[in-house]
Image (cartoon, helix red, strand yellow):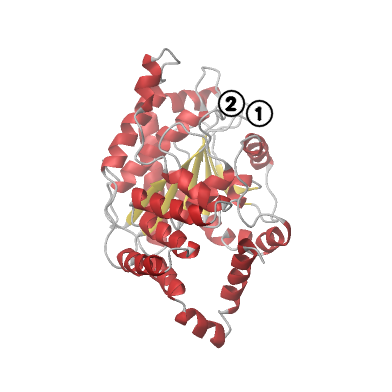
Amino acid sequence: MNRRRFLVRLAGIAAVSAISPLSLALAAADPLATAQHLIDAGKFEEAVSMLRRITVDDPRNERAFILLGRAWAQADHPAQALAAFRAALRINPADTHTRMLADILAQRPLPGETASRDKGGRHGASRQEKAALAEREAFAAGQGRLPPGKGPFRLVIDAGHGGPDVGGVGASGLREKDVALDLALQTARKIQGSGPGVAVFLTRLSDVPLSLAARGACADLYGADLFFSLHAPFVDDASVSGMYLFSLETGGGQDAVARAVAGFENRLAGAMPGFSRAGRHGVEAGMLRGGMLGRFAGQSARYAAILGKSHGVGPFSGQGGVGTAGLSLLSAVDAPAVFAATGFLSNTGDEAVLADAQRRRDLAESLARGILEIVRDAGGGPPDVSPSL
């Protein structure tokens, strides 16, 4: 039996343990299960201490190194997490899921590449790219504050597209990947300034490509309580305008806007190269499709509704809406997940809003307020204050 199948069977044992006293007893006797419980409870220092002892005693324990990487990552120590994941890969180089986690963490701390590229004669940074660079530096300066005891609400903000995948492009040349990154960084920074009740992570902090599997792996890596993905699609109907918030469609149907957004985004996502995510094939894929993918549907829909109510119409001419969509990205995430179409680059009015720096700041503040309402709804929220820098 190869290790991947063994881990899948372990996952099955974990599911049975909910009703089996014997399995519960076996799990309690497993120090790695204990370490996992410590990570889930936000007791990262205890988990790291236990896992480091295990890896010293058993330097070939791949699972211990993977858990150690997760503990370090969730405590916001990316360098130590990267070292642990690389140790796991030395033991099992074929583990593509762990390789993705290592690749994600390798972005941090981020090299200052933008200026050198420009001096080398390649394309100059757009205003959105320069604004995103400043926001990235400000956000990174405020990271690393996790309260003791039970962990805070863990928010993963995903800036759609990146690298050669520019996403939609408006009539003026405004690119979806730049808008998404700027909004993600500004929203993250505003939430970060609201207090210690939320730990904020981003799938990308610069103009880098990420596959769907890598974005989904970020939700795993950081133990997301909410995965929030930002976009500004380009659809065929130029009259579509406004903020649309989607959770995963699991059989309830989708309207014309949802189908248009899913068609556009899924086509671009399908062209993005990357590793396949572990457990997405054959029998394992059927198990996931039948259970895991829908288990957060209700929670995701509720969070989308909270965001929609908080945001209202906003700066756009269109009313927007809340619904479900068959988005490949959402099916790659094993956590409560919301996809936000923050206006449409196919609509000239929406594009003008998104091109305006002040209105993007206002939009980020509105998104931050909505997310803080979600945190309070989840029962772990910060005080009822407006997000601020």
Q: Is residue 262 left or right of residue 34?
A: right
- The amino acid at mark 1 is Asp
The single residue placed furthest to the right in the displayed view is: 282
Residue at point 38% right, 24% down? 114
In percent of width and height, residue 299 lies at: 53, 60
In percent of width and height, residue 148 lies at: 26, 64
Q: Is residue 171 left or right of residue 133?
A: right
Query: SS of the residue at dot 1?
Result: loop
The image's mark for residue 237 is 1
- Whether the residues at callouts 2 and 1 have beta carbons within 8 Å, the answer is yes
Residue at point 33% right, 52% down? 77
Residue at point 42% right, 62% down? 378
- The amino acid at mark 2 is Ser
User: In this view of the protein, which residue sits in the foreground, 312 or 323?
Assistant: 323
In percent of width and height, residue 339 lies at: 54, 45
Residue at point 36% right, 24% down? 130
Q: Report if residue 68 is visible in the image.
A: yes
Pointer 2 residue? 346
**Which quadrant does the C terminus fall into?**
top left
In percent of width and height, residue 248 lies at: 61, 52
Q: Which of the 4 image quarters holds residue 152?
A: bottom left
Sort mark 2 into few (<14), some (14-19) or many (20+) by Cα contacts within 10 Å: many
Q: Which of the 4 image quarters holds residue 134?
A: top left
Q: Report if residue 308 is visible in the image.
A: no
**Which quadrant does the N terminus fall into?**
bottom right
User: In this view of the protein, which residue sits in the foreground, 250 or 114?
Assistant: 114
Per the model, the C-alpha gap separating discs 2 and 1 is 8 Å
Sort mark 1 into few (<14), some (14-19) or many (20+) by Cα contacts within 10 Å: few
Query: SS of the residue at dot 2?
Result: loop
